[in-house]
Image: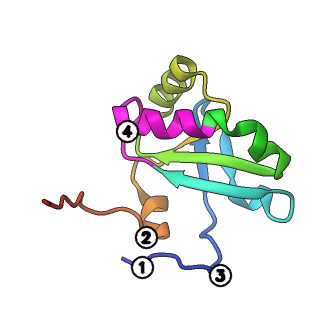
Amino acid sequence: MNTLTIGDNAPLFTLKDENEQNIALADFIGKKQVLVYFYPKAMTPGCTVQAQGLRDSQSRLIELNTVVFGISPDEPKRLAKFCQRDELNFTLLSDVDHKVADDFGVWGLKKFTLG
């Protein structure tokens, strides 16, 4: 698995959002900064806290001309429920086959460490 490093170009992708609309990263090149984050499953405790933090930071991100995309292997219907339940104000994208996560080098087995 190759992980992106500072200065690498992000792999281009087109994915369905929570409304089943296609969103292409290429549409944002040169227009906005893009913050892409990956999470394993919508509506789980850790992923909810992470999403709520981005939701609560949205006004500052807009000031910085930054668009946020949260990507998970969830289907668009589940993403729509997550957006509605937690009043998320940014776009969630469905990467069911985790190809985009693979391209970004972030898909892999969960690793646990014991103190």
Q: Which residue is mark 4?
A: 46
Q: Which residue is mark 3?
A: 7
In-image side of 23 versus 33 (left or right) = left
- Residue at (24%, 61%) from the top-left corner? 109
Q: Which residue is mark 2?
A: 105
Dot 2 lies on which element? loop
Dot 4 lies on which element? helix
Nearer the camera: disc 3 or disc 1: 3
Q: Which residue is mark 1?
A: 2
Q: Is 2 drawn above or below residue 11 in the view shown?
A: below
Decide: marks 2, 1 in contact (CB < 8 A)?
Answer: yes
Marks 2 and 3, how far apart at CA: 15 Å
Dot 3 lies on which element? loop
Marks 3 and 1, how far apart at CA: 14 Å
What's under tag 2, amino acid-wise?
A: Gly
Mark 3 or mark 1: whose residue is earlier in sequence:
1
